[in-house]
Image: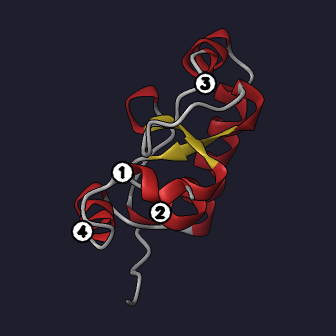
Amino acid sequence: MDVITWGSETDIAREKSEARRLRTTKWWRKKCARGICHYCGRRFKPSELTMDHVVPLSRGGRSVRENLVPACKQCNTNKKYLLPSEWEEYLQGFDGDRGKCAE
């Protein structure tokens, strides 16, 4: 699948910088405190969760609270640049079992 990038490298760098800033906030620590991956629903230590952009930066997403979720490293790696609808299609390859993405 070819990925079309929306936004310039400067735009993406700015959004990454904002994501790094948000990662240091009380809001983000609270979001990770439950230790649950947004995608597979499995439990992890809060320190093991990564920040994921639901709509990836390369696809026009922004580093705003509504677009940021805690994700386990495996789900974040598997999701890559997929949009939410594309991610659902990916999961259907596992018979709809959300937990499969984290194994």
- The type of residue carrying mark 4 is Glu
Image-quadrant location for residue 20 = top right
Relative to 58, 9 lies left or right: right
Q: Residues within 10 Å of mark 2 (few under 14, many from 20)?
A: many
The answer to the question of whether label 2 and label 3 lie on touching residues, with beta carbons closer than 8 A, is no
- Which of the two residues, 92 or 65, is positioned nearer the viewer here? 92
Residue drawn at the location 49% of the way across and 35% of the way down: 69
Q: Secondary structure at mark 2?
A: helix
Q: Is residue 14 above or below residue 42?
A: below
- Which of the two residues, 75 or 60, is positioned nearer the viewer here? 75
What residue is shown with label 1?
Answer: 98
- The type of residue carrying mark 1 is Arg
What residue is shown with label 3?
Answer: 35
Q: Which is closer to the viewer, label 4 or label 1?
A: 1
The answer to the question of whether label 2 and label 4 lie on touching residues, with beta carbons closer than 8 A, is no
- Which of the two residues, 67 or 76, is positioned nearer the viewer here? 76
Distance from the alpha carbon under mark 2 to that under mark 3: 19 Å
Q: Is residue 35 above or below residue 12?
A: above
What residue is shown with label 2?
Answer: 79
Query: Sequence order check: which comes first, mark 2 or mark 3?
Result: 3
Q: Which is closer to the viewer, label 2 or label 1?
A: 1
